[in-house]
Image: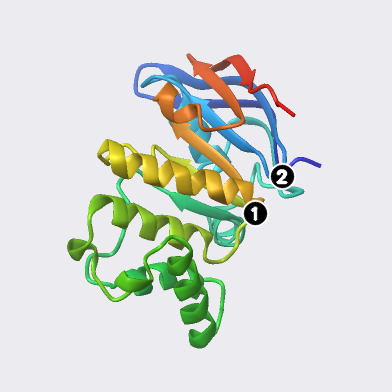
């Protein structure tokens, strides 16, 4: 079974005067170990789709199966548990705690998994080593470059070995060199077997993925899978 299975997903928002349909009949399957990019302009529905895939929101209609569990109608509390167990997030704005060191930032989500302090510290240190920041573990975000902060965010996302890494515009706040480093790291993680879903408006960034899906006006309009050369 796919890691992600979306079946006829609709998402509607009510305003004072009008009902807005952000997603219209979206169906999608993502294989375990796949690297998928979802591309769309502002207003296309990609952020809404990301929120549903990331269990930050639920669909108005349709079914979402994540890691063989139907999460379509779960409570906020249950969704937070699913996020902690199944999803590692990488955001455009890093979302690091400024008063914490890199190591403490990576440890923080592990608290919600009920792990001992010693195990949290070991997993966080191993994760920071994986992204090449073993020498910067005890530095705070203000002492790190933008690219280093994003690598801390990636370390935080992978520390608990979740089945899904969800990256939302991960290069959006970075210069080109730092952005290339981050994308190289995501490709390495995919090569190691991680499932990566990348949300971006940038087709050049999306080209790192195996498969590209485009959204327009809340609908899937195109799928492109790279040719596999033997």
How does the figure colour the protein chain or chains?
A: rainbow
- Whether residue 91 is visible, yes or no, is yes
- Considering the image in quadrants, where does the C terminus appear? top right
- Residue at the farthest right position: 1
Q: Residue at x 50, y 72 (%)?
A: 126
Badge 2 marks a residue whose secondary structure is loop
Q: In terms of depth relative to the viewer, which is nearer, 61 or 35?
A: 35
Q: Which numbered disc flags the more N-terminal residue, 1 or 2?
A: 2
Q: Position of residue 25 (x, y in %)?
A: 64, 19
Say whether residue 72 is left or right of residue 57.
right
Q: In terms of depth relative to the viewer, which is nearer, 173 or 187?
A: 187
Q: Position of residue 47 (x, y in %)?
A: 44, 32
Q: Position of residue 26 (x, y in %)?
A: 63, 23
Q: Residue at x 54, y 31 (%)?
A: 37
Label 2 crowd (10 A; few <14 / some 14-19 / many >=20): some
Marking on residue 163:
1
Badge 1 marks a residue whose secondary structure is loop
Q: Residue at x 77, y 48 (%)?
A: 68
Q: Residue at x 23, y 69 (%)?
A: 140
Q: Which residue is identified by label 2?
A: 32
Q: Quadrant of residue 35?
A: top right
- Considering the image in quadrants, where does the N terminus appear? top right
Q: Are marks 1 and 2 in contact (CB under 8 Å)?
A: yes
């Amino acid at each position: 079974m796919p890691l992600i299975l979306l079946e006829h997903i609709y998402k509607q928002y009510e305003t004072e005067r009008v009902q807005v349909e952000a997603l219209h009949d979206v169906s999608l399957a993502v294989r375990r170990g796949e690297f998928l990019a979802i591309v769309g302009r502002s207003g296309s529905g990609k952020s809404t789709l990301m929120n549903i895939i990331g269990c930050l929101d639920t669909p108005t209609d349709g079914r979402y199966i994540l890691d063989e569990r139907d999460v379509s109608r779960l409570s906020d509390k249950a969704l937070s548990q699913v996020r902690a167990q199944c999803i590692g997030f990488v955001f455009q704005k890093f979302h690091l705690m400024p008063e914490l060191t890199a190591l403490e930032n990576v440890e923080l989500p592990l608290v919600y998994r009920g792990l001992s302090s010693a195990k949290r510290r070991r997993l966080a240190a191993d994760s920071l080593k994986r992204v090449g920041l073993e020498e910067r573990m005890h530095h705070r975000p203000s002492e790190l470059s933008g690219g280093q902060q994003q690598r801390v965010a990636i370390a935080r996302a992978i520390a608990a070995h979740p089945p899904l890494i969800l990256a939302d515009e991960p290069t959006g706040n970075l210069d080109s060199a730092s952005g290339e480093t981050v994308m190289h790291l995501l490709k390495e993680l995919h090569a190691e077997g991680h499932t990566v879903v990348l949300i971006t408006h940038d087709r050049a960034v999306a080209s790192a993925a195996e498969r590209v899906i485009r959204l327009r006006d809340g609908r899937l309009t195109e799928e492109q899978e790279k040719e596999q050369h033997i």
